[in-house]
Structures are given as C-alpha cells and as structure tokens.
Image: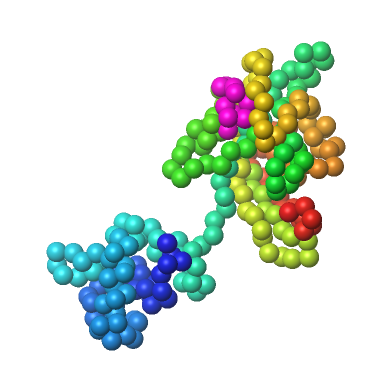
Amino acid sequence: MMQELHILQTKVLRELSLHQTRRFSDMMSVTELTSDDFKFHLRKLVKLGLVLKNIDGVYELTARGKELANRFDYDDQAPIRQPKLTTVVFLKRHNPTTGEIEYLFQQRLRQPFFHYWGAIGEPIRWGEAFETAAARGLLEQTGLVSQLSFKGFYRQRDKLEGSQEILEDKLFVIFVANHSGDRLKDWPFASNQWADADWLKSQPQHFDSCSAMLTMLEDDLSFSEGITTYSTGIY
C-alpha cells in the first residue's frame, strides 16, 4: 500500500505517528500545501483506512495506519523489507537394510535452482502458525501426516556474484518428522531421494542452507546463519 502513497501523504503519516492526535492545521503545516491541496491528500489517507477524524474533531491513525507507519522507512520512502519466512521439514527414517539414519531430499524440477537438492519447504502464510505451514508442505509434497518436532531457525542470505546486493533473505523454521513407512506420493515439482546427510553435502548442486541445517541437527544447535553467492546463470 505504501507504494500508492504520495511523499506528502507519508509526511502526514509520520506526523501522526509522533502524536496521539493532530489538528488539520498541524498536519497541513508539514506538507507546506494550501488548504484545498492538502484536503485531497488527507481524503486519500482516510479512504485507505489509515487515518480517521475522531469525535473531538481531530485526526489520528487507525490501527491499520499505525501498523503501516511502524514499518515504513521514511528516509528511503519505501516499506522496510524483511526476511521471508518459510518452513523446512527433514523427514527421516532408518534405512531398512543398514539401519542408518536417512532423510528425504528433493531435487527441484522447476525454476529457479532447477535440479538443486534440498528438503521439504513451505512458505508461511500471513498469520499462520509455523507448524500448520510445515504440516501443509509435508502433506502436499509427500502425502504424509506426521508428528512435527521444532528444532530451530536458520537464516539464509543470497547474493549475486560481483555484487553486494542481497537478492533473497530467508528465515527458515526447522522441523523434523519421522517416516512411518507409508508410501510417498509423487509430486510434479520435485523428485525424491532417501539418503544420509553426507550424500546431500556431496551433491554438486545442493542448497548450502540445507547442508547447514543438517549440521545444526547433528550439533543440536537452535540457530545458525549463512551467506551464499550465486552466479547469474544459476540464480
């Protein structure tokens, strides 16, 4: 929504965020507009549900306006970007022959990162519980329902080779689930492979974040982070 706002309207939001209430003239003074011109911008803020005129005849931010004003960078005139939230589920089993612990890894069959190996991931929707998102991803991608065990967080930042710009910033919420022995369903966007952690780490095309999270599980850590640089041909 902030992209819809004129710079003068963001000045009004900032003024209101610094006070409980403001009069019409107080807000108009920060914009240096005439009364008629300022009315246009104020009506826009009211129409968007960001500002209201209370019973005392003065203006204040709505709950929606307070939330929006709180996450706006007034110097850059843009919303503050925050890391994406996604869950990752490490589905594990004991190999039926060797008894060794194996995880279900997935090779992506879609862009970006075509053919890269990782684990079961699922974005977290607005207002959604972490475990709900993780359970949905597990069901959609494997057809399984399993008890999930929360293990920690991992932050991954991706950069483009030759640049300091952060292309993607993700916070992974890590869960582990035990495979009950039920048959996995096919999923058109990835192929499945049961293997141990060393196998995943040996694959030329695998996500650094996935191998780092496996190390976290091995070392019983609840948080870690990493930065990976990709070439333009991969990203």
Q: Is residue 224 above or below residue 150?
A: below
Q: Nearer the viewer, residue 39 or 163?
A: 39
Where residue 109 sits: x, y (%)?
72, 39
Q: Which quadrant holds residue 229?
A: bottom right
Residue segment shown in magenta = 137-146
Label tally: 0
* Residue drawn at the location 72% of the way across and 58% of the way down: 159
Residue 35: percent from the left, percent from the top?
Answer: 25, 84
Residue at image location 54% in from the left, 56% down from the top:
82
Along the horizontal axis of the image, is 197 left or right of 217? right
Q: Quadrant of the C terminus?
A: bottom right
Where does residue 13 sit, x and y in percent of width and height?
35, 70
> Is the stretch drawn in magenta largely helix, strand or loop?
helix
Q: Does residue 163 lie above or below 82 as drawn?
A: below
- Magenta-drawn stretch contains 194: no
Image quarter where the N terminus lies is: bottom left
The answer to which of 55 and 17 lies nearer the viewer is 55
User: What residue is rendered at 66% in x and 21% in y?
Assistant: 184
Q: Is residue 74 left or right of residue 147?
A: left
